[in-house]
Image (cartoon, coloured by chain):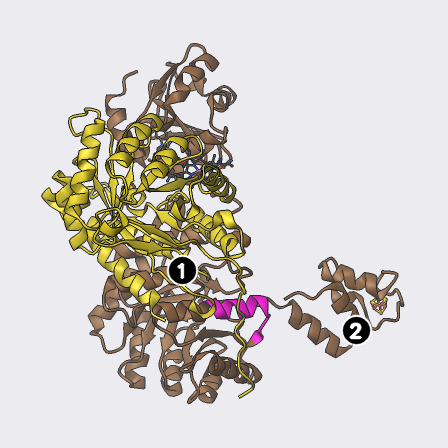
Chain colours: A brown, B yellow
Amino acid sequence: MALSGLEIYKLLPKTNCKECGFPTCLAFAMKLAAKQVELDACPYVSAEAKEALSAAAAPPIRLIKLGSGRREFQIGNETVLFRHEKTFFNKPGLALRIKDTEPAEEITAKVETVHTYGVERVGIEMTFNAIAIENASGDADTFARTVAAARAKTDLPFVLMSNRAEALKAALAQEGGHKPLLYAATVENWEAMAEVAKAGGVSLAVRSRDGLDELADLTTKLSNAGIADLVLDPGSRDLAGSLAQLTQIRRLALKKNYRPLGYPIITFPGEVASSEEEEVVAAAQYVAKYAGIIVLDHFDPAVAYPLLTLRLNIYTDPQKPISVDPGIYEFNHPGADSPLLTTTNFSLTYFSVAGELDGSGIPSWLLVCDAEGMSVLTAWAAGKFDAETIAKAVKTTGVAEKLNHRKLTIPGHVAVLSGELEDELPGWEIQVGPREAVDIPAYLKVWKQ
Amino acid sequence: MPGTVEIPKEKWTGAIRQVTLGATADQGGSRARTVTVGGETTLPFLFFEGAIPNPPVIALEVQDSYPADWSPVLLQAWGDALRDPATWARKAEELGADLIMLRLRGVNSNGQLTTTAQATATVRAVLQATGLPVIVRGPGQAERDNELLVAVAEAAAGERLALGLCEDKNYRTIVAAALAHGHLVIASSPIDVNLAKQLNILISDMRMPLDRVLMDPTTGALGYGLEYTYSVMERLRIAALTGDSMTQQPMICFVGEESWRQKESRAASGVPAQWGDLEKRSVTWEIVTATTLLESGADIVVLRHPKTVGVIRNTIRKLMAQ
Ligand code: B12
Ligand code: SF4
């Protein structure tokens, strides 16, 4: 939680010596509060004041980075409880858990599946972020061997899970320096875990078996022991209990600036689920309600794709819809005889149409109008995708010069625009396309010049 | 231990209105039971700072003629039941629905316009086939909605149906019919707090008691505007709990209709392999949309697939476990 100008002023020398370039300490404090100057500009701040000020400036939920290179991902550093207040920033990492008791071939297959899985939506590549490897065997060597075998197949970050520090130490040695998360320090083992995490320079998850008091106590101890990068497991597994706990943690961090719980959270939707569907439901809850990492026990593309889509939705900035540049887009090498269609520049709309045009194999042109990133009907209702906008796009882009016909297909949902548009574009024939993008290929097949 | 963590609690001053659908014989209707929604004094499922007297409920959608345009996954799951609204409604009740949402399409499968006599006959058949409270939605064009819903309201007088959709451009006739015959209405507005409030005010100005109004914030499916619906529902719920009277209506979300319209729920081929199996993907699409909207304040979710009903029923049960 940021300090106010007055609160900062109390920490300054109050001598008004002007060396910072401001007439008074108070003026300087105000600038500091507005983040327009650096504390260093005052040569006289005491060490305690410095510490207090930098602690207050730290984000209320610590930013944790896992993995390395192109697979690095970060979690935490969220600033709001509800996405409409600003936006959620760092998408929760999705992980698949494997156990070191599973047959080697199965482990390899799972690692490869998760490693290669990627699916595109609105021009954004969506992937899983990590693999969790659990020391279910209880044996350190088996664990280390499994980790090494998995590492040979992927550069995805790992969550290494064991309740024995020696096992984690052995696994860490096989991990290849990709900055895994160690799971988990508990009341029983936290000192040994802290040592392993410290030696490896990696983040450490903390698991409570007795609610938030125990959790806060543990993180305080670990933080005092010099471990700054922590991830929380508050312990609840059931839907209602974990919703309450995760909400409470988020509130404590953001509203009370409560440092002991100012860390991202790891969740395990599969642990009390009795079916894959129950796991999906819990995972969906965790995407919306405050998880930093979601460790799944099943992987199926038919489930992964909806979950990744939900994550994309929830983490979209409510202030700016994802949009594409207006202009002329080409599909399948169009020529002067190819059909011309038009749509808006909302990414979801553009990609729905582009996907069909591309997939149809039929050469075509797509004129994307500047509708301020809104869908066809939203833009139409808001007056941003009307006859005037479309006519203007036709004229300013010079699309006519690319064609030897004057035919323009508009989305079926805005069929009402056709008359007005013919008035705006003399000499053009306005054709009404299907309502849904899926029906575009069939429409193009019978489209005649 | 260094003290205990003090849980920050919101002190909400408002509550969601309780709305009861359906009327039993002694209440002037013919339902075997009624369903009450609303009454919350806290954000969804946060029992640590308020009460949730009524769990969210599930409605299953039934249509008055064969929905040939539905996803093949739905057509297969329901089979021949889709050919007869009464059979369909009975099966929906068996599957564990709390409510039936009957959609009058406005045209039959031969493309002929539905007459008021046909519409009222269908509503009667559905009321006879099931003891559940019923929601009736018109085709969605002002003129036809008014024509059909007025006839339905009269034919089913006293049943406490929920009639919809009332929109800012077309609510007067439906509200008047509901008022005259003892029904409820659904106020529908396009993902906007102020428009939702405004419509509730207009409807209440017609002397419709607010415990007979449900609110439809407009549903965007997963991947198709879900995040907008999610956020507007959170905002409406926060406004309601903060004491803003005209946002305190229970919310209904047409999850199935939106979710099953999307390509992800329909296309078996010609889609990326990463989308996985159609049936599993499409059902998951509906499950995820429903779950997310329940978490943002839905009191009624209207679903389409039999399997989703079981999963969401179980989800609600778990979320209500204190
Ligand atoms: C999300 C949403 C919003 C979001 C905006 C999202 C965005 N960036 O556009 C928000 C909440 C901001 C919003 C606002 C409004 N909205 Co709005 N919104 C929706 C919602 C839920 C989904 C829209 C969507 O994303 N669709 C998905 C995209 C991909 O669809 P699409 O662009 O139409 O594209 C499809 C087809 O048209 C086709 N297609 C597209 N291009 C082309 C081109 C050709 C040639 C062809 C053949 C086909 C084709 O392919 C696509 C896939 O099939 C719909 C209701 C619904 N459930 O659909 C209402 C809806 C569109 N909104 C509506 C309204 C009225 C509004 C507002 C005007 C309300 C208000 N008065 O404030 C405002 C306007 C915005 C403003 N003033 O700034 C109405 C429009 C009513 C109408 N029929 O005119 C709708 C239908 C809701 C309703 N039932 O009332 N909205
Ligand atoms: S340099 Fe420091 S002590 Fe001097 S006026 Fe600025 S803030 Fe005050």
**Image coordinates for residue A126, horizontal then vertical, percent:** 38, 53
* x 52%, y 62%: residue: B12
Residue underneath mark 1: A287
Read off the chain for label 2.
A
A129 to B179, vertically: above or below? below
Mark carried by residue A45: 2
Q: Classify A254 as above or below B153.
A: below
Task: Give the foreground label among 1 and 2.
Answer: 1
The yes-or-no answer for disc 2 within 8 Å of ligand 2 is yes
**Is residue A307 shown above or below A219?**
above
Give x and y (percent) for residue A26. 82, 64
Q: Amino acid at mark 1?
A: Val
B259 on left or right of A234? left
Would you say residue A90 is visible in this rendering?
yes
Give the CA separation, mark 1 to mark 2: 43 Å
B187 or B63: nearer the eye?
Answer: B187
Determine if residue A129 is in view.
no
Taking the magenta stretch, the answer to whether it contains residue A356 is: no
What is the number of callouts on the image? 2
Q: Residue at x 36, y 71 (%)?
A: B322
Q: Quadrant of ligand 1?
A: top left
Instruction: Give the magenta part as a residue range.
Output: A247-259
| Outermost top residue | A427
Res A6 quadrant in image: bottom right
Indicate the quadrant containing the N terminus of chain A: top left, top right, bottom left or bottom right: bottom right
Q: Chain of mark 1?
A: A
**Mark 1, other Cα within 10 Å: few <14 / some 14–19 / many ≥20:** many
Quarter holding residue B173: top left
Residue B124 higher or lower than A303, as above or below:
above
- The overriding secondary structure of the stretch rendered in magenta is helix
Closer to the camera in the image, A409 or B152: B152
